[in-house]
Amino acid sequence: MANIKEIANKAGVSITTVSRVLNDHPYVSEEKRVRVLEAMKALEYTRNVHAVHLSKGFSNMIGVVLPSIRLPYFSELLAGIADAAFASGVHLTVYQTNYEIEKEIFALSQLKQRQVDGLIFCSKAISDEELLEWKGPLLLCQNSNEGLFSTISIPHQDAFRHGLNYLIEKGHKKIAICLARKKGMNSHFRIKAYKEALAEIGETFVENWIVEKALTICDGKELYHKWNKWKEKPTAILVANDQVSAGLLLEAKAQGTAVPDELAILSFDNHEISQSLGITTIDIQTKEMGKQAFMLLEKRIKGQPIERKVLEYRLIERSTV
Amino acid sequence: MANIKEIANKAGVSITTVSRVLNDHPYVSEEKRVRVLEAMKALEYTRNVHAVHLSKGFSNMIGVVLPSIRLPYFSELLAGIADAAFASGVHLTVYQTNYEIEKEIFALSQLKQRQVDGLIFCSKAISDEELLEWKGPLLLCQNSNEGLFSTISIPHQDAFRHGLNYLIEKGHKKIAICLARKKGMNSHFRIKAYKEALAEIGETFVENWIVEKALTICDGKELYHKWNKWKEKPTAILVANDQVSAGLLLEAKAQGTAVPDELAILSFDNHEISQSLGITTIDIQTKEMGKQAFMLLEKRIKGQPIERKVLEYRLIERSTV
DNA sequence: CTGAAAGCGCTTACAG
DNA sequence: CTGAAAGCGCTTACAG
């Protein structure tokens, strides 16, 4: 592999001039520029990015930390990030953590080692406090109590409350909810909204009616059977994710339970599957969130101050409520 | 940020010794090792990976080229690759191409610049011939006419044929097929298998009955309506992907078409959605393919010869045929 | 517009 | 077991 020095020799200029050509600097005579370009062609030159990174001190690559690429929510988010990154000529590396803290820490150590210029946490197991001990540009795709991170988020409490109100308007009082997990900021706010709503309509809170660890279509099917076994049955379930809603709806249909008459389902995401199945859902602009996440992280990398953006949500009426 | 030189100073040793400690070399006296380790702790040392890469000449990172992260087939494949890569301490970067050749070429140029040590093509638009002009370790997740790439693949022709035979056994003669796209090796082999099967049962080939550009649940819904408009209707459709099958099945049910009595559906993938919906499908071990892809690429990077592996497939009977 | 030189931070023969 | 020195391939003040 030819290097900059060989190019300089062949073109009869200094390596400085070659570097200038490489970096589109002004102040290179047209004549020399041409000679350099020709030399590069002749020698099939390709720049060694590692040398560039070492010299410049950054890598032009960001890392994305997420539990699982296969969950539609995260692949959608990742796709949004990937589009924005590509548009800015920034590389992406993915850290799939399965919510294991060691893997999240691995990603952070990579940031420290400058493997990446910054990190987007799509979701995380590590606490905000622990995260604060690491330096380097970070962006969280969720709200944070600490005002020390840039964040892009959905107002989950409001959105959940909005969903609950909608169910209440439609006459439901016995409402269960289903979350991806109980931990995490998002769930925290959702549960808060849930309790508030129940209090307002004078229903007692039943711990049991918060179902958790639900992420996939299969989990949704299980949710149906859980619902079916409860002696007192909720008439509606607010589900935090389209996949689970899909499983729930499909199993309900398969078992002859009428939706929404016997069981209403209100979902979150508005991904393709909810559209296909006609599930009423709350759109949370996942892909847009990915784009914004990238842009906010870029700002942090450039040294701009912390920013906290909040996206809009929108309830889409279909046929399950 | 402290560097190796400062560590050496503080520990009172040479930078060579520090490097040895860093790389777990033998032949470092225990006493100096301890001194170095202490100095690193005191100065909060972190290695600069760019310098390591420049020195060593490789980056310990591979690239994955795929059209879209959001399509379940690819996110499944990517998850398999990611697991295997993490287990080997190798980094992953993702090139989402949307089947645009320029983006594929961008990935190849990154390989040339040593941004990555190798590239896995999950699917591609670029021709094998063009690909051959680029050097560097490559791995294709599909068969190739050129014997010059390492590949991991499913015997698509056999598998497709197997599916067709199964439909024929079940009494179907009017069979349509639905592919992700017409281009590409996989489709080539599938169409070949289709024509063979038709010839054997004495059916005439109808160009029209090869539906293409079908990837999502929505595409599956459209496929239903296409089917519904044909004057002569196939009694079975062999669909190359679970998402499309799901859309097709759901729309058929919604429109009151009996599956499998009026329309049989045989799918490919065996992803979660086909299980949930009870779709008869051919399992193609997507995640396993990801793992194997990584391992084969690793071998190429280490300079081992080209290898071509083929995975097994398996028909899973459920309720749509 | 141009170039010599120092610097980025590590690794690795080589000599001891 | 240890270290001085060259090398990886680029960028960037600085001086002209």
Image (cartoon, coloured by chain):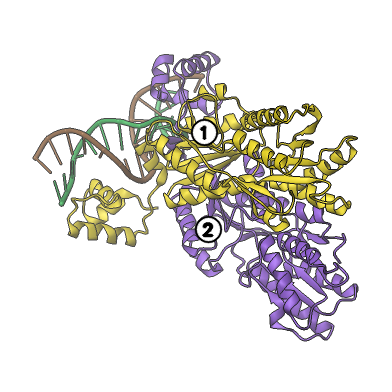
Chain colours: A purple, B yellow, C brown, D green
Q: Is residue A207 left or right of residue A133?
A: right
Residue B212 visible in this rendered orientation of the protein = yes
Residue named by callout 2 = A97
Q: What element carries label 2?
A: loop
Q: How far apart are marks 1 and 2 (CA)?
A: 26 Å
Residue A313 visible in this rendered orientation of the protein = no
Badge 1 amino acid: Gln
Q: Which residue is located at x 50 percent, y 60 percent?
A: A104
In front: B101, or A272? A272
Q: In the picture shown, does residue B242 fall above or below B296?
A: below
Q: In the picture shown, does residue A154 fall above or below A189?
A: above
Q: Which residue is located at x 77 percent, y 61 percent?
A: A250
What is the x, y in percent for residue A135? 49, 59
Q: Is mark 1 on a helix, strand or loop?
A: helix
Residue B78's tag is: none
Residue named by callout 1 = B110
What is the x, y in percent for residue B200? 70, 29
